[in-house]
Image (cartoon, helix red, strand yellow):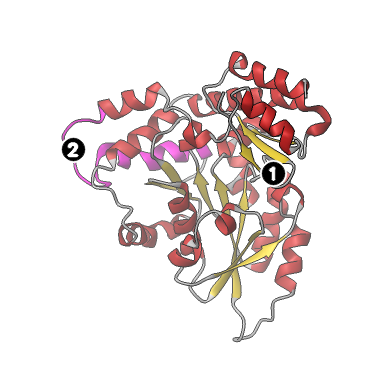
Amino acid sequence: MRFFSDNAAPVHPAIFTAMADANVLDTAYDGDRWSKALDARFSELFETEVRALWVPSGTAANCLALAAMCPPHGSIVCHRDAHIQNDECGAPEFYTHGAKLFLADGDGAKLTPQTISAVLDATRYDVHQTQPHAISITNATEYGRVYSPAEVAAIGDLAKARKLGLHMDGARFANAVASLECAPADVTWRAGVTALSFGFIKNGGMNAEALIFFDTDLADATLYRRKRAGMLLCKGRYLAAQLLAMTEGDLWLDLARNANTGAALLAAAAGDRLVHPVEANEVFIRVSAAEAASLRALGFDFYDWGPGEARLVISWNQDPADIRPLADAIAAL
């Protein structure tokens, strides 16, 4: 009956099994055999050489990636509704030691080359203004919209032409890839992405995310930034074990597909109440305060999302039997 956040979902049993298997004496920090296996595992997944670092949160992944691409005197272009702008308590500015976020617009929290260029072209290229060094996009976005490989590639071409890094906040990257039914490479490095925050916690993980560098030269200094930020956990093998378990076979995709399927079920029930097209595992609907209260009176839990709107999030472990009662209740409003 709870649809307020996939952050609150249970941990997949395979994660606990993997952590139990790693519960042996080994080297501390990131020198263990699980951590050392990450580069090869993610290089295979993305079909190119990458550097993969575990971190304990999505905020850490985002901000360490941005710090690798943007100096303190620089700026980062992102959507005005981006998580790094609205929900990370100034962490990007903190980790970059002062870089500014330049805010752009776009439907469904999606940027386009045109909206990015509007921000870039308004910047004077002189010493009195911060200069752009990176673009950050979210896939799937904060409104559950998905960037296609072509859409990412168009932004990637702009980033390359402007000599900017391109970061992808992939807190729900699995849901995006499951929706697109494409290779992970197609919507990342082949489309010009420099670094990816690969989210696992929302998708059945416990406390491990992957920071993926497609520009492998950026990883070396990030090792020091991770330590300086207090993010180099002494028993990092437990985080690495989670990432290896999630990427064993298609587990990460199977869990995301299940969540996406559940969201499609809600979307069909919502009909013209939908605020945004449902492309991943989030559903935004129009409801009055009285209607929202009636849903809560039935036991359903969700976030209000601005006046007259609600956000419903489907988690990896919810099946149609869990979702059907809410779908029926929405249809009956």
Task: Return the residue at label 1.
Answer: 147
Q: Is residue 27 magenta?
A: yes
Q: Residue at x 23, y 47 (%)?
A: 234
The answer to whether 7 is drawn above or below residue 89 in the figure is above
Rendering quarter of residue 12: top left
Image quadrant in which you'd find residue 156: bottom right
Q: Name the residue rendered at 70%, 25% in the picture.
A: 266
Q: Are marks 1 and 2 in contact (CB under 8 Å)?
A: no
Above/below status of 26 relative to 50: above
Say which amino acid is labelled 1. Tyr
Query: Who is closer to the viewer here, 259 or 215?
Result: 259
As for residue 256 lying within the magenta part, the answer is no
At x 77%, y 21%, the residue is 331
Residue type (three-letter) at the residue carrying disc 2? Asp
- Classify mark 1: residues with Cα within 10 Å, few (<14), some (14-19) or many (20+): many
The residue located at (62%, 54%) in the rendering is 82
Pinpoint residue 290: horizontal percent, then vertical percent. 73, 34
294 horizontally vs 214: left or right:
right
Give the residue number, with chain letter if any, for mark 2. Answer: 26
- The image position of residue 105, as x and y in percent, is 74, 58
Q: Which residues are magenta?
A: 21-46
Q: Is residue 168 above or below residue 140?
A: below
> Quarter of the image containing the N terminus?
top right
Q: Earlier in the sequence, mark 1 or mark 2?
A: 2
As helix, strand or loop, the secondary structure at mark 2 comes to: loop
The C terminus: image quadrant: top right
